[in-house]
Image (cartoon, helix red, strand yellow):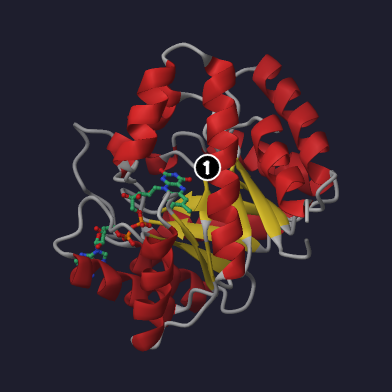
Amino acid sequence: MNLPISFEFFPPKTPEGAEKLRGHRQQLYARSPAFCSVTYGAGGSTQEGTFATVREILAEGVDAASHFSCIGATRERVREQLAQLKAMGVKRLVALRGDLPSGYGLGGEFHYASDLVAFIRAECPSDFHIEVAAYPEVHPQARSPEADLKAYVTKVRAGADSAITQYFYSADAYFRFVEDARSLGADVPVVPGVMPIISSTQLMRFSDACGAEIPRWIRLRLQAFGDDTASIKAFGLDVVTSLCEQLIRGGAPGLHFYTMNQSAASLDILSRLNTP
Ligand code: FAD
């Protein structure tokens, strides 16, 4: 399979977590990822951990993308962080608005990811490849699907080079999104974000929070497995491999795996995809 793949991690909270993640990364590197990305807590809460993990990945000889969210930030602060990322050798950013934890106001000088993309392009025109987030099933706070699509197109026009989607389990939602965006002139590559299914409760919790739809038949099957994790993993592997096959057949330009700092589930899917 020659399709570009990438892996996403979150910054580990403990030295043990960091050590485990190093091991998982080595396993995943066997698949020659185009890059690995590291998430960034909105409001800068994980900045140190994000940058430290990005540094490690670069030192391991792999291209690293730092996620970067702007909500609550000032222009001066973002300018400083961009300089820091540049000095670290980072060439790829995932530019996001982010979400502030409830209780925080929406202060700061950036309102939307498109403001951040425009700012990065103005400050350092060609230093970074800029990825943005795309939502085939519509961002949960969007006024309407049309408004969300327009917001995506605005991010692309502001200077994004490519996009990574929120995860989804309906290939049709992805293909429709790509087609609609193209019809509005936004034709940068849109790489599907793939969430392996390894735990039913974790998946339900995340999906409720980020607005990703778990089709009824998948939800019911997962619920029926109860605590039987082996069956959940086997079923999840079938479902997600089949989704990836549909995406590849339909022309997806790559696959971006939400690894949850684990390697086995993503590697299992990739092994299946290599099977004729
Ligand atoms: P935006 O593109 O700014 O959109 C946010 C909302 O505002 C949408 O509802 C949109 O329709 C609306 N909107 C945009 N522009 C306008 C406008 N001009 N007028 C009116 N409405 C508008 N979160 C993190 O905290 N850290 C991470 O590392 C992280 N990584 C992610 C990676 C990917 C690939 C994805 C898909 C999501 C990630 N998230 C991350 C989650 C993301 O921060 C949230 O989904 C957040 O709510 C929106 O960020 P955004 O960049 O998509 O925002």
Using residue 31 as the reference point, say whether residue 166 is left or right of it: left
Q: Position of residue 212 (x, y in %)?
A: 34, 46
What amino acid does circle 1 point to?
Val
Using residue 114 as the reference point, say whether residue 147 is left or right of it: left
Q: Position of residue 86 (x, y in %)?
A: 66, 60
Q: Residues within 10 Å of mark 1 (few under 14, many from 20)?
A: some
Q: Position of residue 211 (x, y in %)?
A: 29, 45
Relative to 202, does residue 135 appear above or below in the rendering?
below
Relative to 181, does residue 27 appear above or below in the rendering?
above
Considering the image in quadrants, where does the N terminus appear? bottom right
Q: Which residue is disc 1 drawn over?
A: 239
**Which residue appears at 72% of the width and 45% of the height?**
272
Is residue 38 visible in the rendered image? The answer is no
Considering the image in quadrants, where does the C terminus appear? bottom right
Looking at the picture, tell me which residue is in the foreground, 176 or 13. 176
Quarter containing ligand 1? bottom left
